């Protein structure tokens, strides 16, 4: 064993090494705890995950083999991408159709509220209010619904023509609705 004359450097090296070991151990235990809540699947390699286990030309065959071993719901990691593979139609119907309300949602975007977009239907969270807005939108903008707006459009067109004839210089104000 090599010893140095400076005890301070030895202490710093031991502290640095202890920090690295404790941090690595803490991350490993946190990943194990996180993995308990996931479906079973093949054990991933560090950094690579399960990428070496998957046939790149026919990955569905690999998923079918994993399904025979681990069940209908499989967790796999490819590099840093985590994925859940559903391996049977009954499970996919149960999760994606019958319980879709749990999974069908948009991510929360904190930047929407300051700009006044928090109630935009395109960014709204999946809820009863959103479904009502969507139903009203579809009822209003269907092709056959345009016929309902025809009398109002004709009336406004007549008003605009009369206003343009009375005051042609301010045409922009007459065209604004």
Image (spheres, helix red, strand yellow):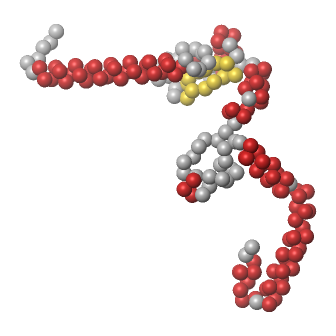
Specify the quadrant of the image occupied by residue 29. Answer: top left
Specify the quadrant of the image occupied by residue 23. Answer: top left
In this rendering, position of residue 14 left or right of residue 27: left
In this rendering, position of residue 169 left or right of residue 30: right
Which residue occupies the extreme front position in the image? Answer: 128
Give the residue at x 14% y 12%: 2
Q: In the image, residue 28 lies at what x, y percent?
A: 43, 19
Give the residue at x 48% y 21%: 31
Q: In the image, residue 78 lies at what x, y percent?
A: 55, 24
Q: Is residue 74 visible?
A: yes
Q: In the image, residue 26 lies at what x, y percent?
A: 39, 21
Q: Nearer the viewer, residue 51 or 155?
A: 155
In this rendering, position of residue 111 left or right of residue 67: left
> Which quadrant holds the C terminus?
bottom right
Q: Is residue 54 visible?
A: no
Number of numbered discs overlaid on the protein picture: 0
Give the residue at x 68% y 13%: 71
Give the residue at x 90% y 63%: 148
Q: Nearer the viewer, residue 87 or 147?
A: 147
> Which quadrant holds the N terminus?
top left
- 19 to 129, vertically: above or below: above
Q: In the image, residue 102 lies at what x, y percent?
A: 69, 32
């Amino acid at each position: 064993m090599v010893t140095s004359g400076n005890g301070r450097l030895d202490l710093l090296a031991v502290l640095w090494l202890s920090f690295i070991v404790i941090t690595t151990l803490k991350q490993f235990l946190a990943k194990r705890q996180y993995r308990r809540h996931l479906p079973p699947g093949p054990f991933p390699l560090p950094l690579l995950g399960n990428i070496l286990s998957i046939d790149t030309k026919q990955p569905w065959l690999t998923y079918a083999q994993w399904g025979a071993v681990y069940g209908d719901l499989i967790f796999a990691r490819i590099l840093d991408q985590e994925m859940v593979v559903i391996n049977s139609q009954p499970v996919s119907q149960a999760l994606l159709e019958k319980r879709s309300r749990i999974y069908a949602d948009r991510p929360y975007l904190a930047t929407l509220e300051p700009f006044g977009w928090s109630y935009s239907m395109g960014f709204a969270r999946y809820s009863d209010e959103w479904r009502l807005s969507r139903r009203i939108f579809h009822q209003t903008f269907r092709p056959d619904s345009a016929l309902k707006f025809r009398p109002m459009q004709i009336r406004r067109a007549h008003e605009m023509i009369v206003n343009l004839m009375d005051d042609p210089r301010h045409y922009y104000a007459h065209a604004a609705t």
